[in-house]
Image (cartoon, helix red, strand yellow):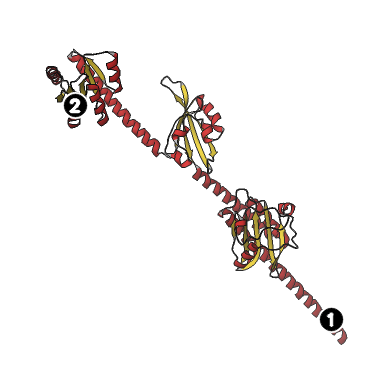
């Protein structure tokens, strides 16, 4: 037998005593018996009953319905109305307070017991549902993945609010909107169609609300109690960090392979101009630049330039009369690289020659070997601008350029020295031969 605690609110004392005795005989504990709405509110807070039997019609300023409304504001306790009236207006007012049942006077013990037990069971179910709902909301708010449901038209019916803020969205703003409208990739149309046919699908896509993000999405059919597919349930998982790392590794592997191939290529016998041409073509490709220029120093002066095809075609440069701007002079003096995505804002920038295309961004680095300036390497025109990775890459190319130029110059010096020595030997042998002839 249940030992639930019951409070009785009844303004007729004989009836109140009768109900209390019945409750006790049924095994319930009566915590209080009160006769007014005001007292019911007070004693409910003091005794904290498990259930309240509330007479609708009470003497005083507050009837049972008003008392129930006030109690509901202060605590969660099931209330069962006791009434001798069943008119529509009374029932309408009572429904608003969300009662757990009604019992009409006069009533039998079995009716009283049934109403109380059903009310307690319903209240326990509601409590569990409320706890589960709170737990579900807490999970939705804490997970980093975007959990969502959509109907058969692809319109969002639920979305976890927690992660959306990081992408500049609010859950209330996206509900009722299409998956494609919110997340902007047409691939969702196809995948929702497949999920609505009963297929579980996983796919990858990109999204750029302000920055670029990479996502992996899983969609599954959403079914009702009868097993009919009514929509989809899905998870958007942000894999930007993993994808960025993977792409960075792929790019680094590509760069290392390209630099190794370039280094091997430069070991072959080449002219200084051919070395510069190989370097500029590789720099332009690896940095995704539109223009590239390389120059090496000869006799202490930077005067030998190699231009890529786009530079020759679009920039109208005359290398014989090319004047060095402030940026190049600064690099030669300081032996440091420069990355500028808005060159015109830098006081060292002196503009471009007449008929030259406007430079929107650039990187220029020195080619230095053992603290000796060997040359200059410059790229410009990358869509979207350059970053520190581009600067580091160009400096690595400049280091290879410096080694190749230095090796070639040393080879040329050695060859010139060998030729001079050969000439001297030949001259010496000629003199000796002439002397011997005279002696004979």
Rendering coords of residue 126 (x, y %): 30, 26
Q: Pick out the residue farthest to the front.
A: 61
Locate the N terminus and report the quarter of the image it occupies. top left
296 displayed left or right of 437: left
Of 42 and 146, the residue lying toward us: 42
Label 2, residues with CA under 10 Å away: few <14, some 14-19, many ≥20: many
Residue at 72%, 68% (x, y): give it.
Answer: 412
Rendering coords of residue 186 (x, y %): 57, 32
Of 337 and 341, the residue lying toward us: 341
The answer for how far apart the CA atoms under marks 1 and 2 are is 139 Å
Residue at 58%, 49% (x, y): give it.
Answer: 251
Q: Which residue is mark 1?
A: 433
Rendering coords of residue 330 (x, y %): 62, 65
66 displayed left or right of 30: right
Element at badge 2? Answer: helix
Residue 388, compared with residue 243, is above or below; it is: below
Of 308 and 5, the residue lying toward us: 5
- Indicate which disc residue 220 carries: none
Residue 61, compared with residue 243, is above or below; it is: above
Q: Pick out the residue farthest to the bottom.
A: 439
Which of label 1 and label 2 is nearer to you? 2
Residue 65, compared with residue 343, is above or below; it is: above
Residue 373 visible (yes or no):
yes
265 displayed left or right of 110: right
Locate the C terminus and report the quarter of the image it occupies. bottom right
Label 1, residues with CA under 10 Å away: few <14, some 14-19, many ≥20: few
Rendering coords of residue 230 (x, y %): 47, 23
Q: Which residue is mark 2?
A: 40
Tell which circle, 1 or 2, labels the residue nearer the N-terminal end: 2
Element at badge 1? Answer: helix
Which picture quadrant has residue 9?
A: top left
Residue 270 visible (yes or no):
no
């Amino acid at each position: 037998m249940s030992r639930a605690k019951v409070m009785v609110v009844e303004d007729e004392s004989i009836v109140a005593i009768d109900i209390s005795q019945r409750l006790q005989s049924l095994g319930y504990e009566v915590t209080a018996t009160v006769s007014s709405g005001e007292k019911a509110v007070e004693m409910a807070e003091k005794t904290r009953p498990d259930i309240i039997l509330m007479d609708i019609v009470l003497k005083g300023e507050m009837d049972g319905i008003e008392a129930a409304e006030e109690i509901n504001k202060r605590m969660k306790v099931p209330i069962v109305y006791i009434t001798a009236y069943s008119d529509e207006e009374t029932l309408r007012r009572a429904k608003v307070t969300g009662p757990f049942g009604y019992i009409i006077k006069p009533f039998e013990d079995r009716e009283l017991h049934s109403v109380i037990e059903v009310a307690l069971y319903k209240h326990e179910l509601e409590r569990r549902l409320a706890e589960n709902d709170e737990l579900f909301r807490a999970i939705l708010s804490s997970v980093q993945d975007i959990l969502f449901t959509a109907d058969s038209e692809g319109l969002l019916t639920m979305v976890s609010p927690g992660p959306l803020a990081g992408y500049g969205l609010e859950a209330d703003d996206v509900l009722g909107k299409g998956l494609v409208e919110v997340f902007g990739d047409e691939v969702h149309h196809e995948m929702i169609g497949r999920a609505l046919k009963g297929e579980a699908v996983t796919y990858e896509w990109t999204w750029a609300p302000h920055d670029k993000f990479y996502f992996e999405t899983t969609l599954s059919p959403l079914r009702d109690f009868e097993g009919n597919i009514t929509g989809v349930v899905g998870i958007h998982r942000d894999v930007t960090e993993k994808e960025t790392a993977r792409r960075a590794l792929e790019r680094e592997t590509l760069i290392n392979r390209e630099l190794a191939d370039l280094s091997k290529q430069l070991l072959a016998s080449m002219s200084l101009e051919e070395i510069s041409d190989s370097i500029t073509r590789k720099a332009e490709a690896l940095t995704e630049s539109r223009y590239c220029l390389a120059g090496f120093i000869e006799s202490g002066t930077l005067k030998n330039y190699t231009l890529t095809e786009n530079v020759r075609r679009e920039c109208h440069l005359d290398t014989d009369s090319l004047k060095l701007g402030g940026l190049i002079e600064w690099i030669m003096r300081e032996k440091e690289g420069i990355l500028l995505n808005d060159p015109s804002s830098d006081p060292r920038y002196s503009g471009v020659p007449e008929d030259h295309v406007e430079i929107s961004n650039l990187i220029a680095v020195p080619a230095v070997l053992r603290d000796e300036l060997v040359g200059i390497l410059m790229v410009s025109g990358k869509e979207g601008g350059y970053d520190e990775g581009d600067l580091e890459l160009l400096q690595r190319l400049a280091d290879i350029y410096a080694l190749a130029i230095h090796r070639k110059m040393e080879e040329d010096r050695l060859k010139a020295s060998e030729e001079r020595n050969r000439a001297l030997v030949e001259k010496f042998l000629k003199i000796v031969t002439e002397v011997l002839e005279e002696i004979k």
